[in-house]
Image (spheres, rainbow, N blue to C red):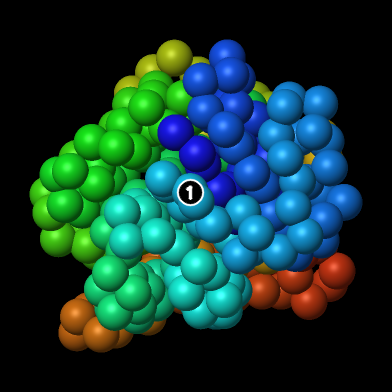
């Protein structure tokens, strides 16, 4: 197949690289900052000047952009150049309102739309170990399956309705943000009480209270190792805002997410937006 990959940041670049691996597909890549896409040339990927240049003639278009507004802007530019048989896999975390708007844009353009955000960070993306949360028409999902297999270890099929993937992604992101913020506060509490925070992590290790993510992010927090980012703090804050927006629209008032967001935003205001999300501990 001919693949157009739009958005080659921390997640998008390794995803495009894994899709191109083996030479089964012709891959064209575009990124707003072209320099970030240039390393893909070594993998046989054609790096193009404009999104429309990548999309022309593509069987599948993949968008992996930072947020809803960026994806909406790029979609408006690229959809007029998509073919009648093109499938669009929207892989980013854009939130429910943007997902509805994107699906409507796809319908208007006559393009099949697959709502398929991915679960994972930089290392799983590099290793092809992401989890794809896929919703869309069966024929369109079927065409995307080789790409899902190239980037992920697992695909969760959620039915034909666009939005189902995005809803599950927000549920998962709430869990990730709450766990990360709780780990940060627990480390801060340990320090305040004169307890070695590493002893906390060692004590829960291997037991029912343990979580690999707590060990990973907690270890980074203790070491002050926030760069290079596995997932930038600024994007984590964006994801929590999307969670709160969706909860509010559903009439639900969450207890943990507002506190987590306050920590993320405080760390971002202190200049740590480009650091790993573990830098939430610096928002205290």
Q: Is residue 22 left or right of residue 49?
A: left
- From what the image shows, is residue 148 above or below residue 91? above
| Point 24% across, 42% down: residue | 141
* Residue 26 located left or right of residue 85: right
Rendered view: 212 above or below 253: above
Q: Residue at x 55, y 48 (%)?
A: 4
* Number of marks drawn: 1
- Callout 1: 10 Å neighbours few (<14), some, many (20+)? many
Q: Say which quarter of the image contains residue 152.
A: top left
- The N terminus lies in which quarter of the figure? top left
Secondary element at image label 1 = loop
Q: Where is residue 11 in the image (x, y as percent from the top left)?
A: 62, 43
**Quarter of the image that includes the C terminus:** bottom right
Q: Which residue occupies the foreground of this view, 174 or 190?
A: 174
| 157, 232: nearer the viewer | 157
**Relative vertical location of residue 209 with respect to residue 194 in this rendering, above or below:** above
- Residue 113 visible in the snapshot: no
Q: Nearer the viewer, residue 220 or 230?
A: 230
Tell me: 75 left or right of 14: left
Residue 54 seen in the figure: yes
Name the spot of residue 126 as percent of width and height, x first: 63, 27
x and y percent of residue 38 in the render?
Answer: 84, 42
At x 65%, y 59%, the residue is 53
Q: Is residue 72 left or right of residue 192?
A: left
From the image, tell me which residue sits under label 1.
58
x, y (%) of residue 251?
A: 19, 84
Residue in the picture at 36% in, 54% down: 86
């Amino acid at each position: 197949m001919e693949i157009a990959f739009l958005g080659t940041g921390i997640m998008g670049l390794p995803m495009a690289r894994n899709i191109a691996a083996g030479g089964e597909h012709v891959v064209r890549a575009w990124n707003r900052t072209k320099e970030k896409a240039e390393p893909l040339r070594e993998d046989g990927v054609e790096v193009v000047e404009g999104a429309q240049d990548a999309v022309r003639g593509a069987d599948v278009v993949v968008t992996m952009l930072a947020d809803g507004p960026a994806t909406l802007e790029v979609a408006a530019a690229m959809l007029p150049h998509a073919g009648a048989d093109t499938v669009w896999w929207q892989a980013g975390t854009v939130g429910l309102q943007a997902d509805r708007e994107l699906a409507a844009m796809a319908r208007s353009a006559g393009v099949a739309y697959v709502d398929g955000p991915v679960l994972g960070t930089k290392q799983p993306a590099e290793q092809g170990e992401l989890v794809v949360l896929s919703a869309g028409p069966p024929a369109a999902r079927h065409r995307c399956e080789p790409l899902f297999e190239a980037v992920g270890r697992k695909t969760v099929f959620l039915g034909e309705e666009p939005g189902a993937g995005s809803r599950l992604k927000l549920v998962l992101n709430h869990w990730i943000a709450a766990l990360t913020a709780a780990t940060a506060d627990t480390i801060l509490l340990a320090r305040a009480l004169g307890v070695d925070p590493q002893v906390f992590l060692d004590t829960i290790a291997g037991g029912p209270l343990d979580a690999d993510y707590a060990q990973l992010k907690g270890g980074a927090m203790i070491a002050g190792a926030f760069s290079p980012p596995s997932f930038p703090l600024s994007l984590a804050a964006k994801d929590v805002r999307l969670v709160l927006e969706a909860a509010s629209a559903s009439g639900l008032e969450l207890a943990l997410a507002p506190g987590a967001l306050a920590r993320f935003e405080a760390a971002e205001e202190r200049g740590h937006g480009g650091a790993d999300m573990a830098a939430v501990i610096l928002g205290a």
